[in-house]
Image (cartoon, helix red, strand yellow):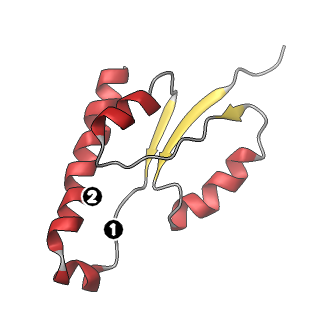
């Protein structure tokens, strides 16, 4: 019997963590699902999380000096985006 397909959602898949993790995960034939989206978009997250087994939340703006000039963008991504991930995961079960 083969292993079941694991559905993993990684937010921040294009960041430093995602750049390291995603290629390794894609080498596993039991893993599928690539969706481009934004953690600021809760409805997109809810759609993306449908049928997902595991969520790894790594999306964040991390360059602090940049945030000093435009803190609202950091709040939208790091705080509201995280809140969206939490609520989308709860909605998806």
How many numbered marks appear? 2
* Residue 23 falls left or right of residue 60: right
Secondary element at image label 1: loop
Residue at numbered disc 2: 77
* Name of the residue lying farthest toward the top: 1
On the image, the x and y values in percent for residue 75 come to 18, 62
Judge whether 92 appears above or below 55 on screen.
above
Q: Is residue 16 above or below residue 22?
A: below
Q: Earlier in the sequence, mark 1 or mark 2?
A: 1
Residue 10 x %, y %: 50, 46
Q: Residue at x 61, y 35 (%)?
A: 33
Q: Is residue 69 left or right of residue 81?
A: left
Q: Which mark is residue 16?
A: none
Image height of 33 relative to 53, above or below: below
**Is the N terminus in the top left, top right, bottom left or bottom right quadrant?**
top right
Marks 1,2: beta carbons within 8 A = yes
Gap between marks 1 and 2 measured at Cα: 7 Å
Q: Is residue 58 left or right of residue 82?
A: right
Which percent across, then down, holds residue 40? Answer: 28, 49
Q: Secondary structure at mark 2?
A: helix
Quadrant into which the C terminus falls? top left
Q: Is residue 3 left or right of residue 66?
A: right
The structure residue drawn at horizontal position 27% and vertical position 58%, both measured from the top left corner, is 77
Q: Residues within 10 Å of mark 1 (few under 14, many from 20)?
A: some
Residue found farthest to the right? 1
Residue 61's disc number: 1
Q: Position of residue 9 (x, y in %)?
A: 51, 39
Residue extending farthest to the left is 72
């Amino acid at each position: 019997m083969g292993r079941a397909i694991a559905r993993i959602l990684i937010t921040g898949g294009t960041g430093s963590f995602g750049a390291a993790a995603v290629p390794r995960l894609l080498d596993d034939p039991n893993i599928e699902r690539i969706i481009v989206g934004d953690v600021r978009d809760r409805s997109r997250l809810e759609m993306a999380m449908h049928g997902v087994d595991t969520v790894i939340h790594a999306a964040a703006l991390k360059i602090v000096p940049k945030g000093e000039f435009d803190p609202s963008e950091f709040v939208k991504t790091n705080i509201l985006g995280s809140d969206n991930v939490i609520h989308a995961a709860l909605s998806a079960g």
